[in-house]
Amino acid sequence: MKHILGVLLFAAVHGVFSHAWAGERVNVGAYAFLPFVSKSGGLTSDLVQAMNQFQNTYEFHLVDTSPNRRYRDMANGSFTVILFESIKWGWDASQVDASKVFLQGDGEVYVARKTPGRGQDYFKTLDDKHILGVTGYHYGFANFEADPAQLAQHFRITFSPDNEVSLRNLLAERGDVAVITKSYLKSYLIQVPQAATQLLVSDRFDQTYSHTALVRKGSTPDVKEIDQLFSKMEAAGVLKKLWSRYGLD
C-alpha cells in the first residue's frame, strides 16, 4: 500500500497524469483578423474557451501565426486546427479537411470617405482606386489572390497589418477604398459613432463568409469530431450566445 501511495504521489508531483486529466492538447492557429482575433482576445478566443468548457477529451490552445505564415505553420504541425477559415483562401485541399459551415454571414465591404455627390456608383470599379487591404487576406475583387507582388501588377494597393490600420489610413486620406470586415466596421462605429458621418459603405460585399474549421489531415480531433462538437454546441445554444455577443447572429 505504501508503495502504491508513493507511486501516486510521484505521479501527482511530476504531472504524469496531468495530460490525461486535462485532455489531449490541440493547438489552434490564430492571426490578426478583427473581430475574430484581436489584441484583447476576440471571438476565436471565446470560441476556444467554450469548446474547452463543453467537453474534456481535448484541451484547445491558441497559438500565434500570421496570414502569410499560417499555411507553413499548419504543414509543420505548429497547430492542427484553424477556425473561421475557408479552404478557398489559399489552402491545399490535399493537406487539410474543411468542417461543415458553422457560421454563415458577415463578410467584407468597401469603405470610402464621404464627399458631396459621392454615392454607391463610386464602388462600381476599383481599377482607378487606391485600395487599402490587409497583408495575406484573400479578396473577392482579386479572385482571392493574396500574393502582394501579383496584386501590385493589377491594382494600386497598399497593405496594412489589420482592418484597424486600414480604416485609420482611409480616414487619413492615404487611400481611396478600404476593404473592411463588416462586423469589425459595425463594432468600430459603435465605439466611434461620429465616424459614420465620414464614411461611405458599399451596399454590396466584396465577399461573404462561410466560416469553417480547417483540420490538418491525419490529426486528432479529425474534421468529423469537430463537426460533432459544433453540432452539439449549437444544439445546446452555446454558439448562438457567442454570435450574439459579437453581433453576428
Image (cartoon, grey):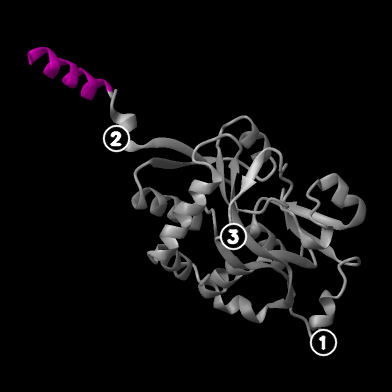
Quarter holding residue 128:
bottom right
Q: CA distance from mark 1 to mark 3?
A: 40 Å
Residue for badge 1: 117
Q: Nearer the viewer, mark 1 or mark 3?
A: 3
Question: Which residue is rendered at x = 8% and y = 14% of the image?
Answer: 2
Mark 3 closeness class: few <14, some 14–19, many ≥20 residues within 10 Å:
some
Q: Position of residue 178 (x, y in %)?
A: 74, 65
**x, y percent for residue 217:** 61, 37
> Which residue position is annotated with label 2?
21
Chief secondary structure of the magenta portion: helix
**Residue 176, image quadrant:** bottom right
- Residue type marked 3: Val
* Mark 3 to mark 2 CA distance (whole Å): 31 Å
Image check: 83 left or right of 60?
Answer: right
Provide the residue span drawn in magenta. 1-14
Mark drawn on residue 101: 3
Q: Label 2, secondary structure: give it.
A: helix
Q: How many marks?
A: 3
The amino acid at mark 2 is: Trp
- Kind of residue sitting beneath label 1: Gly
